[in-house]
Amino acid sequence: MLRVDNLKIYYFLRDGVVKAVDGVSFIVPDRSIVGLVGESGSGKSTLASGILRLIPPPGRIVDGKIYLDGVELTSLSEEEMRRIRGRDISMVFQDPLASLDPLMKVGEQIVEAILAHEDISREEAIERTYKLLNDVGVGEERFHSYPHQLSGGQRQRVMIAIAMALNPRILIADEPTTALDVVVQRQIMELFNELRNKYSTSILLISHDISLIIQWSDYIGVMYAGELVEFSESRKLVEKPLHPYTQALIKAIPRISGGSSRLYSIPGSPPDLTNPPSGCRFHPRCPYKMEICESKIPEEYNFHGHRVRCWLYEEGIG
């Protein structure tokens, strides 16, 4: 479905080069939800924008390939890429209020997205919009509402309707529940799951909330400082997290019963990506740091599909 091979996205600034995404490779299988998790600044959103070829200057893709159903996206012209966005691959952004046009009715915004890509009549586009609004739980009666007249959850559902308007093969959801309360958050995630099954759409779900990623994803990728440090089926990763950073993220999930009342936090801070640490980028914060970690970039080890970048596994898993 979607394959990313050794993708590198750098921002070229006066103060240096920010290696926001540095050699990331993963796949999104057909009709699956793949979760990407990591702290703020780990490169998750840059990766999502890079897949859509929407990196703003002074950033650019400097290496790597992106394949969608066998089509290599980085070599396409902007006009060819414009036809793919929305139709084959679309995105739900973090802040729906900033993404929606405040002066345009929400139904008209969906109609506009459809007519921009398909040669159909306006009446057909309106009928499809009514169906989409019903499918996402907003209701066709909200066609003539403006964004400010909707709740945060309703606005996010409208954004999902826009993203699903052309039945894309891949839907990228970048922090889609960040500004929502936990009840609406669950409703939105249930909606994603329903749409995945109904429209046979694969979803790349991006979040800093590892508990959300664990609950809803079939596969999980863990990003740290621009690198993908672990990738596995969700069940395997939860049962046996391999990378010390993944272990720390899971340990930091609040527990509602048992144990100490003190919350665990990962010591230190993510590195400056204009001058990342030598060797393993996590080694300044790692409790298992070895001498080799400070000087040599870790190899990637693959244990039956469970991939990890860490020198702890040079001789295999004990």
Image: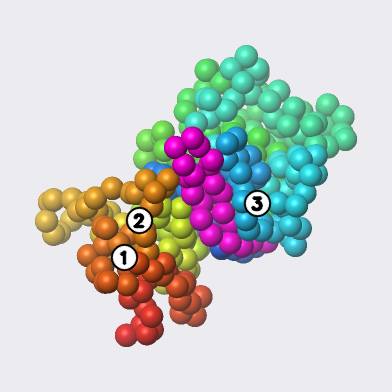
Q: Main secondary structure of the magenta part?
A: strand
Identify the residue under disc 2: 277
Q: Nearer the viewer, mark 3 or mark 2?
A: 2
Asked which secondary structure carries label 3, the reply is: strand
Residue at (45, 76) in percent of width and height: 301
Tag 1 and tag 2, C-beta contact below 8 Å: yes
Tell me which segment is drawn in magenta. Answer: 1-24
The answer, for residue 196, to whether it is visible in the render is no
Q: In 3D space, how far apart are the residues under numbered discs 3 and 1 (Cα atoms)?
A: 38 Å
**Label 2 element class:** loop
User: Identity of the amino acid at label 3?
Assistant: Ile
Q: Which mark is residue 126?
A: none
Residue 245 colored magenta?
no
Label 1 neighbour load within 10 Å: few <14, some 14-19, many 20+: some
Q: Compare marks 3 and 1 and give the one earlier in the sequence.
A: 3
Inspect this view and state whether residue 162 appears.
yes
Coordinates of residue 129 in the picture (x, y in percent): 71, 32
Looking at the image, tell me whether mark 3 or mark 2 is earlier in sequence order. 3
Residue 58: image quadrant is top right
Label 2 amino acid?
A: Pro
The colour style of the image is rainbow
Q: Is residue 17 left or right of residue 66?
A: left
Mark 3 and mark 1 in contact? Answer it, CB < 8 Å: no
Tell me: 89 left or right of 58.
right
Q: Which residue is mark 3?
A: 170
What residue sits right under mark 1 in the picture? Answer: 294
Q: Position of residue 197 (x, y in %)?
A: 62, 55
